[in-house]
Amino acid sequence: MQEHAYYAAYRPQTAAYILHMNPYFAYPPVVTSQGTSPVVVFGATGYAGQVLVRLLDRHPALHPVPVSAHTTTDLSPQDQAALQGCAAVALALPADASRAWTEAIAGRTNAPVIDLSDAHRTRPNVPYGIFELWPDDLRGARLVANPGCYPTASLLALVPLLRNGAIAPEPVAIVGKSGASGAGKGVAEHLHFCELADNVYPYKVGAHRHVPEIERHLGTSVCFVTELLPIVRGLLVTAFVRPRGRPEDLLSVLCDAYAEHPYVHVLDAPDARLGLRHVVGCHDARIAVGPVARSGLVPVFAAIDNLMRGAASQALVSLNRVLGLAPHLGLAAPEPPSTGLPGMKGAWT
């Protein structure tokens, strides 16, 4: 399949692709004898951390350096040396641990930090890393808040509609369904195989930690309900909105918003192409708009991989941006929607 022109134009040939003349260049590259720049990864054994390490392993200009420290006081000499000589740091940790490490790292390195937790996502002065929606916010950033999986899907579907006045700025109802990996590696009864297999149920109703994040970046309140699916990966959100004009205008607004963003596919109808098998293992997001209901509400859908677009591959885009690299460097080329039902390509990414 021929590469999308946008991606092909930025494909590098060597690690020397680090753009010294790029206007987005913020930090001098740290190039090792391997010919690539080191990225220190905390939490490399977690689900999102594992995927990020694999992505960095394949990156033409970066490579991962997982650290072994469990607390801010037990950094080994090797870990300290890695921090002092790294190009960037990625925190794939729970929120409390990320807060502690963010403070601890500040005294050990000047490298930018990408935080995959929700520790900083609602802070007003911390850039929020959805490239398609806020492409310029990462210039010179020292700390970037990597968006959550549900917020990523919800905001990709709704922000362009609100910006263009295509929907009323009133409370939005959002229903999200995701696989069990979104809960992380923690042990909980509702995540046991005997509880989840052949089952679907809501969780954290009225108290989901992503609600403040969605509301802050969406600019309106939401009624947010999540349901756990008996699968490993993948996420689908359905938002119910009230159009201000013709319902078909919503599709046009989304198409225009993502015309230059090849990793967001706006479908002409909500059908099997929204299936999670199409997005698991890749950075692609798929969005669709349904027909207007008798209630006057229109459903808007978005599907992503919670461990890729909802975590690791989105963090990689932010790393690329703060280091002056092409935004999608190191990612597989986007694939246009098809009507087939593919296997989970790259499911072990």
Image: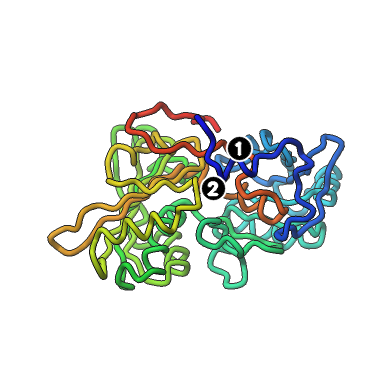
Kind of residue at disc 1:
Gln
Q: Is residue 63 left or right of residue 244?
A: right
- Circle 2 residues within 10 Å: few <14, some 14–19, many ≥20: many
Q: Which mark is residue 311?
A: 2
Kind of residue at disc 2:
Ala
Residue positioned 76% across, 58% down in the render = 105
Residue positioned 62% across, 72% down in the render = 125
- Residue 285 position within the rendered picture, expressed as x and y whole percent measured from the top left: 44, 46
Q: Is residue 308 left or right of residue 250?
A: right
- Can residue 201 be seen at all in this image of the molecule? yes
Residue 146 picture quarter: bottom right
Residue positioned 70% across, 49% down in the render = 325
Check the image and tell me how it is coloured.
rainbow
SS at circle 1: helix
Q: Which mark is residue 183?
A: none
Taking depth in this image into account, of 127 and 331 the one nearest to the observer is 331
Q: Nearer the viewer, mark 2 or mark 1?
A: 2
SS at circle 2: helix
| Residue 2, placed above or below residue 81 | above
Q: Which residue is mark 1?
A: 50
- Residue 236 position within the rendered picture, expressed as x and y whole percent measured from the top left: 36, 46
